[in-house]
Each structure stands twice: as structure tokens, then as C-alpha cells.
Image (cartoon, grey):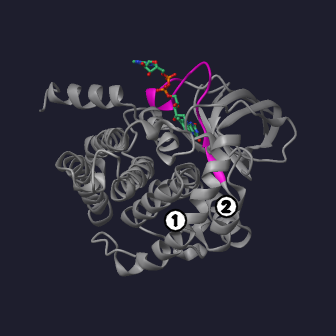
């Protein structure tokens, strides 16, 4: 393994494991992308090596990694397979979110954490809908929870449910009919009335199987209501969401490495040496490496602030959104440069850059989208107390 100045001692074991899997994950990624199949084998490996419990608190038997550590693991996984990294990132990110903002009743959190550690269960948030769009934009869910006695009956339709084929628990946002509040309901996969509609046939991140979730008269007890969504003024900045840019940075690093390896080998008829000796090729490699450094330094600096100065977290909203913006756009730019360096061969489906180019685009549509970040930061400049 090359020396990585960002990897600390505690992380070495995890990073070494991912490096060991790299070739096999890359090989599986080709098939899973082609067939839009979920990377079950990767998840089996990840489960057996404790990756499902990375963010579970130590008191419940987990690893309780910090945000900084979580992001580095995401970045390395993203380099091996973006779809695997993004999918696992949702599960670990949500466990971290609840750990940090204590938004669930502690008994419910303890119980799910113990299931994660002992049985390797997976969960994800199902918050996006065809009608109300991205939850990051503040729309109220059209999925409705109706109180009947002490139970709730839930009806609705969710889109973009990453990990759909393998989830044990779905965290479903729904508008509670009598109060108008938005609740999060923890629903086990086997509940009657819950089904998956395999709609995920996309350009990017095909192996995440972010299918539709249908809820038809799903009856749950009141204990399934694990939290009530805060209104926008009470909402706290969410560090865990940086698992998204970390994953796309990994994809970009993979593209950079493909381009560098290509440049070392490719010797066209017009030259007596590989194209790596051409100054313009080196300039392109430098541009990619500078983008990677820019993105990493910014992301890990903010992650350290988050970890080491919890008292500043409420002020880090702009920083987190800026990291998402800078890192995902850098990642798109890096893959673009890698393809320009390689040239026309990069367009072949048999060449890894073609998939990396498609996958990296998805980052632009994960939250927060750039337009939301511009609005938030732009508005801040004109707030009264600024
Ligand atoms: C690979 C991948 C995996 C995902 N996994 C999950 C998951 O596991 N769980 C989950 O819940 N979600 C998931 N998502 C969904 C994601 O979080 C977004 O909800 C989704 O991509 C839709 O975002 P959007 O901004 O395009 O949505 P929309 O809200 O539909 O917006 C579409 C467009 O309309 C415009 N627009 C809409 N509303 C406004 C507004 N109020 N003001 C200004 N402009 C507006 C903007 O131009 C925007 O680009 C995933 C997405 C991707 C790409």
C-alpha cells in the first residue's frame, strides 16, 4: 500500500482489507453494472469483516468510527466500487446520524444496533418520492401514516431506495395524518403490504439497486415511529452526509489511476515512447492530482473540525455543503480529464472509464444539490446579522 498521509494507525486495518478486495470488487463491478445487479458478494464480504458496524457506538459492540475515519473508508471503498460504497455509506451514515443527534428513542436505537452487531442487519432511509422529490428541498411526504387505535397504517410510494434488495429495515418518512408532523417509521422487510418495484434502470450507480418501495396498508405499532422530523429552523447540520462526496472522490481516484496506467503503457505509432512522456499528458495528470488534493484537504479538514470541536457543529452547515459541492464537482472534473487523457478508447464499454464516467455523474443528484448550496450560502451573505 502506498503511504497515504491521511490514514492514521486505527484505519490501517480497514484500508488494508479494502485494498485486498480491490481487484475482486472491480471485477464484480463490471458485471453488476452491466446487469444492474446488487453486489451481494461484496456485501457478504463486508458483513463478515465488520463493515456493517463501523459507526455503531462502542457501548453496543460497534467500532464507533469518527466522521474522518468513516469518510476515508468510504473513499477507499468508492475507489474499488462506487455502488458498493454509496450503498454501504447510507447504512453506516444513518447509524452515525442517530448516534450523533440522538433523534431516536434510545431503546429503539440500542435494539437496532445490537441487531447490526449480532446479525449484520442493514437499514436505509426511504425519503424520496415521485411527487415530493428530494427531501433536502423540504417537501412534505405524500406517504401518509394514519393512526388506528395504537397502530399506524402507512400508504405511500418511495423512489431511490438504495440497497432495496438486501435491506432488513426501511426507515420510511410519512406525514402523520392527524398531527401533520413528519414521522420516521422503522419497518422490517417482512411486513405485509411492503414491496419493492424494480424500477432502477439508470445511467449511473446501477448496482445500488435504488428501486421503488411501495407501502400498501402497512400496519405497524406505535413503537415503529422512531422519530419526528424537526422543522427547518431546528434542523442541525449533518456531517454524516459527507459519505456521499467521499464515495465520488474514490470513483475519481480510480479514474485517475486508470488514466495514469494507460499513459505508462500506450505507445502509439507516432511515438517511440509511451504517452506518459508527453508534457501535455503530465499536465493533465497534475491537474487531476491537484483536484484530488484540493478535495481531500477540504473534506478531511472539515471532518476533523466536526469530530474534534462538537461545539462548532451547529455552525458548520455552510462548510459541509461546500465540501459536497467542491468534492463532487472535482470528482466529475477528474473523470473528465482522465477521459481526455486516454482519448477515444475511454468510450468503450470494455474500458473502466466508461462506467466511472457514468457513476460519477450521480453525485450531482445526491443531497444537497448544487443549486441548494448556492441558495443557502448566497442567502447567508444578505442575512441581517452578517
Ligand atoms: C444513486 C442515488 C442513490 C440515492 N439513494 C437514496 C436513498 O437511499 N434514499 C433516498 O431517500 N433518496 C436517495 N436518493 C435520492 C436523492 O437523495 C434525491 O432525492 C434525488 O436524487 C432527487 O433529487 P432532485 O434534487 O433531483 O429532486 P427533485 O426535488 O425532484 O428536483 C428536481 C429538479 O427540480 C428543481 N427543483 C425541485 N424543487 C425545487 C425547489 N424547491 N426549488 C428550486 N428548484 C427545485 C431542481 O432543478 C431539481 O434539479 C438517491 C439518489 C441517487 C442519484
| Residue 364 shown in magenta | no
Q: Position of residue 127 (x, y in %)?
A: 59, 35
Q: Could you say whether the residue bearing mark 1 is in a helix, strand or loop?
A: loop
Q: Residues within 10 Å of mark 1 (few under 14, many from 20)?
A: many
User: Disc 2, disc 1: CB below 8 Å?
Assistant: no
- 122 versus 54 height, above or below: above
Q: Residue 43: which numbered mark, if any?
A: 2
Residue at numbered disc 1: 55
Between disc 2 and disc 1, the foreground one is 2
326 sits left or right of 280 in the view: right
Q: What's the residue at 17%, 50% (across, down)?
A: 279
Q: Residue 114: which numbered mark, if any?
A: none
Q: Position of residue 55 (x, y in %)?
A: 52, 65
- Residue range of the region highlighted in magenta in the rendering: 123-139
Closer to the chain start, of discs 2 and 1, is 2
Q: Quadrant of the C terminus?
A: top left
Closest to the observer, 303 or 297:
297
Closest to the observer, 278 or 86:
278
- 311 versus 354 height, above or below: below
Q: What's the residue at 48%, 44% (across, down)?
A: 356
Q: Is residue 141 visible?
A: yes
In the image, the residue with mark 1 has its CB under 8 Å from the nearest atom of ligand 1: no
Amino acid at each position: 500500500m502506498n503511504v497515504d498521509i491521511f490514514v492514521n494507525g486505527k484505519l490501517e486495518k480497514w484500508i488494508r482489507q479494502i485494498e485486498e478486495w480491490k481487484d475482486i470488487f472491480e471485477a464484480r463491478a463490471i458485471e453488476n453494472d452491466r446487469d444492474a445487479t446488487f453486489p451481494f458478494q461484496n456485501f457478504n464480504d463486508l458483513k463478515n469483516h465488520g463493515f456493517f458496524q463501523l459507526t455503531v457506538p462502542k457501548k453496543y459492540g460497534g467500532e464507533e468510527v469518527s466522521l474522518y475515519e468513516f469518510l476515508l473508508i468510504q473513499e477507499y471503498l468508492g475507489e474499488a466500487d462506487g455502488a458498493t460504497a454509496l450503498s454501504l455509506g447510507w447504512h453506516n451514515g444513518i447509524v452515525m446520524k442517530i448516534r450523533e443527534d440522538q433523534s431516536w428513542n434510545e431503546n429503539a436505537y440500542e435494539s437496532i444496533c445490537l441487531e447490526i452487531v449480532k446479525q449484520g442487519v442493514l437499514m436505509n432511509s426511504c425519503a424520496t418520492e415521485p411527487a415530493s422529490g428530494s427531501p433536502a428541498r423540504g417537501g412534505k411526504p405524500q406517504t401518509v401514516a394514519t393512526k388506528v387505535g395504537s397502530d399506524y397504517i402507512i400508504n405511500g410510494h418511495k423512489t431511490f431506495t438504495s440497497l432495496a434488495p438486501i435491506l432488513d429495515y426501511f426507515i420510511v418518512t410519512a406525514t402523520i395524518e392527524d398531527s401533520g408532523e413528519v414521522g420516521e417509521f422503522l419497518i422490517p422487510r417482512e411486513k405485509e403490504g411492503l414491496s419493492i418495484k424494480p424500477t432502477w434502470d439508470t445511467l449511473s450507480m446501477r448496482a445500488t439497486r435504488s428501486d421503488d418501495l411501495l407501502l400498501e396498508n402497512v400496519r405497524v405499532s406505535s413503537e415503529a415511529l422512531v422519530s419526528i422530523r424537526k422543522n427547518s429552523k431546528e434542523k442541525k447540520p449533518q456531517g454524516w452526509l459527507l459519505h456521499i462526496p467521499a464515495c465520488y472522490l474514490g470513483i475519481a481516484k480510480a479514474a485517475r489511476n486508470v488514466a495514469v496506467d494507460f499513459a505508462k503503457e500506450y505507445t502509439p505509432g507516432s511515438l517511440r515512447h509511451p504517452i506518459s512522456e508527453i508534457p501535455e499528458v503530465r499536465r493533465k495528470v497534475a491537474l487531476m492530482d491537484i483536484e484530488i488534493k484540493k478535495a481531500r484537504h477540504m473534506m478531511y479538514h472539515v471532518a476533523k473540525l466536526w469530530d474534534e470541536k462538537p461545539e462548532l457543529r451547529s455552525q458548520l452547515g455552510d462548510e459541509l455543503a461546500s465540501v459536497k459541492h467542491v468534492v463532487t464537482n472535482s470528482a466529475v472534473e477528474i473523470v473528465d480529464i482522465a477521459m481526455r487523457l486516454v482519448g477515444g478508447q475511454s468510450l468503450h464499454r470494455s474500458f473502466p472509464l466508461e462506467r466511472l464516467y457514468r457513476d460519477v455523474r450521480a453525485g450531482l443528484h445526491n443531497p444537497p444539490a448544487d443549486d441548494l448550496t448556492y441558495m443557502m450560502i448566497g442567502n447567508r451573505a444578505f442575512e441581517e446579522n452578517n
